[in-house]
Image (cartoon, rainbow, N blue to C red):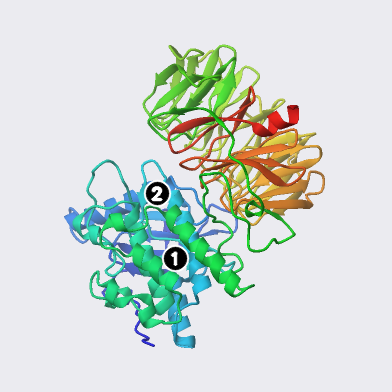
Amino acid sequence: MEADFSTENLFNQPIMFLKSGTVVAERYVIAKVLGSGGMGNVYLASDQTIPNGRACAIKETPTPADEPPTREQYVRIRALQMEADIMSKLHHPAIPRVFDFFPWQRRHYLVMDHIDGQTLNDRLVAQLKEHGAGFDEPTVIGWALLICDLFDYLHNQDPPVIHRDIKPENFILTPQNELRMIDYGIARRLTGNQRITEQGTQGYAAPESYHGYGDPRTDIYSLGALMHALLTGKDPRHVPLFAWEQHRARKYRPALSQEIDDIIMRCLQTEMRDRWGSARELREALITLRQFLQRAQPGQEPARVAHSVAPSHPSGTMPRPLCITGVEGDVLDMPALAPPIAWVFEAQGAIRSSPAARDDLVYFGAHDAHVYALNVRDGQQQGTFAVNGNVCSDPLVTERSVFFGAEDGHMYALNRSLTRKQWSYPIGKPIVASPALCGDLVVIGANDGLVYAFPQAGGAPRWRFETWGPVRGTLAAFGEQIIFGSQDQRIYAVDAEGQRRWHRTTRDKVEAPPVARRGVIYIGGMDQHLYALDQDHGTILWKRHLEGCILTAAATRDGRIYAGSADGRITCLDARTGETKWRYNVRSQITSDLVLREQWLYFGCADGGMYCLDAHRQEVCWRHQAGGAIVTRPALVNGLVIIGSVDHRVYALHDTAASAQEA
């Protein structure tokens, strides 16, 4: 076995580093150097504005040597700006969060999560030293499935994001056995026929990367090279350029299955059209192989790495699993029929704004900078209104008006027919949060960290409430209280006059909308906890760890709380004690709010699956497959379930569960 895997020396050039103890921008205290490369240095630091000093990673452009900076130095600064812009708009548990971007003493700095753990590069080097061979097949398949799940998220953004630098050094395995992908320095959003820079790591970079273009299949090529390296220990940088056919994985490790060898080779095809068409397609092939290996060697499935991914099944049917756990339901446990489609409406951009139905019309916004009104019965467009930015905000529809915010930094009020703007107000920062109605006020949060309360009739905000981070989730009004989460890792309760009633600190940012029942607020956070708080005082009655970030609203009924998390599970808990009653695994991140009607639970997922789950029987009644993630709250109206997807479509589905119950 060749033990020729190598790691580049990070410190092979004279580089100036900040000293330990340096305070950057009067806020971040440098602890040590984590690494250095062509695009700059990376430090471990602590944020002194957070109690006990939150650990963070700081990326720094090299010190400009000349005045003015050279073209090369400008390129590095621009690359860091683009990295900050891309990462700030991505929200996935495998992607570090960005907190800050600023210039300081002629350098530029990007502040993000510090991910504790080992890179896959370090793990591979240790594996080769200890065992003289790469990782076993099930382990690598598990990691590849997680990466496919992440690719599915990135490549279905609008516009798509490609990472372009997939290699072992850019993945960290945490002590909790979770995979994180770092270094988005050459990641790019694909817009039209725009050319991209000719960058990447030799051996991992696809052929088209050398010619200034690419698409999601560019990342799939690199993932093939990564799997090859992890299985064989053969450094792709030592393989003659694009000569993979002569260096197949089984050449270096004959015990590998022919199937994994073929899967990798399809990733590594020179022509893009010959590769897997999408991360989802590759994922299905890997899951099929994993099931085959399970049958051959029962009980050897890697414990956590594959739980958040699963194949999509556009037909609506799903194969039975190899074994049933018995402790939680599984989407593979039974076939789920696809519901009949009443109608489909296609916009010109992704739908991230939840449909709101009123008086036979359904309203929503889109990433084509429009708000739409459709007839509920047949989906025919009844009205539209153009603004100057994408609309992610869920519309608030009253008797006379439609209220929403937009990424152009304005708050809008339109008439119900969408023919006239009643008023607008320039906040200046993008608004992706959704408004709530509190008495005669429309209350909404913005990316500037402020919550604004507008009179319904328009005019300047009656009051503003300041937090320490962007407010991106849906606000909720309960009586005279407005409750919401912020990216400053707090949950707030504010009264109708804009005065803080209480706040509670969490371990991570909070974007999920709150729900209330009998004086208790239930809200989830990205710290993977579901909180039950006393509505009057904010006292924590209980909190439960759910093994996945909670980005969406829970649902409550009959003394039960139902929450969805990023690990692909619906968890049912006792509303009084927080005791877990049961869990159901749909094997894809829960990305929409949960809506409960009688015993039927409705929700959407990152893989495009829209589900109706019988909460009494703990089984799926039906599943609809959309062409992209469903991040919108389902609207239940006139026997229809209306949802929007990032595939640009709004779907109206006949609710066969409701029909069966009525029959």
Q: Position of residue 22 (x, y in %)?
A: 42, 63
Specify the label residue 374 is tagged with.
Answer: none
Spatial separation of the CA atoms under disc 2 and disc 1: 18 Å
Q: Position of residue 507 (x, y in %)?
A: 62, 53
Q: Earlier in the sequence, mark 2 or mark 1?
A: 2
Task: Confirm or deny contact between disc 2 and disc 1 (CB under 8 A).
Answer: no
Residue type for callout 2: His
Residue that carries the numbered disc 2 in the rendered image: 155
Q: Does 3 sit left or right of 489 as displayed?
A: left
Local packing at callout 1 (Cα closer than 10 Å; few below 14, some 14-19, many 20+) is many
Residue that carries the numbered disc 1 in the rendered image: 171
Hey, which quadrant is residue 89 in on the image?
top left
Q: Quadrant of the N terminus?
A: bottom left
Q: Position of residue 555 (x, y in %)?
A: 70, 38
Q: Position of residue 19 (x, y in %)?
A: 39, 69
Foreground of the two, 568 or 421: 568
Q: Secondary structure at mark 1?
A: strand
Give the residue at x 59% y 12%.
Answer: 399
Foreground of the two, 128 or 72: 128
Give the residue at x 48% y 16%.
Answer: 414
Q: Quadrant of the C terminus?
A: top right
